[in-house]
């Protein structure tokens, strides 16, 4: 996989976080874009550097969400 710069990674990571939040609820009760911005850099520096895609990183992150409240109506 091609290494993305941090901005490119964050855009794709955030998009996937939004997709996952529609299925699983908001991550830890936080708005998905705000949440993604707070954690994307850590994934970019660690797992993406090991060859993980932004989508794989987001999927990994979502595996830790537990019964997050759904987005407000």
Image (cartoon, rainbow, N blue to C red):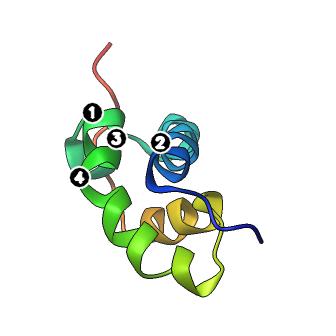
Q: Nearer the viewer, mark 3 or mark 4?
A: 4
Between 73 and 34, the residue placed more toward the observer is 34
CA separation in Å, label 1 and label 2:
11 Å
Q: Are marks 1 and 2 in contact (CB under 8 Å)?
A: no
Where's residue 52, x and y in %? 63, 75
Residue ID for mark 3: 26
User: In the image, is 14 to the left or to the right of 65?
Assistant: right
Q: Nearer the viewer, mark 3 or mark 2?
A: 2
Up/down of 55 relative to 7, above or below = below
Sequence-earlier tag: 4 or 2? 2
Residue ID for mark 1: 31
Dot 2: element = helix
User: In the image, is 39 to the left or to the right of 13?
Assistant: left
CA separation in Å, label 3 and label 1:
6 Å
Q: Are marks 3 and 1 in contact (CB under 8 Å)?
A: yes
Q: Residue furthest bottom?
A: 50
Residue ID for mark 2: 14
User: In the image, is 12 to the left or to the right of 35?
Assistant: right
Seen at 53% across and 67% down, the residue is: 57
Q: Which mark is residue 38?
A: 4
């Amino acid at each position: 996989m091609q290494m993305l710069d941090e901005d490119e990674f964050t855009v794709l990571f955030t998009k996937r976080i939004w997709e996952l939040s529609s299925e699983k609820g908001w991550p830890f009760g936080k708005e998905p874009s705000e949440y993604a911005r707070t954690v994307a850099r850590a994934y970019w520096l660690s797992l993406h550097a090991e060859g993980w895609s932004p989508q794989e990183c987001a999927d990994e992150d979502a595996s830790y969400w537990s019964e997050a409240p759904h987005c407000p109506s």
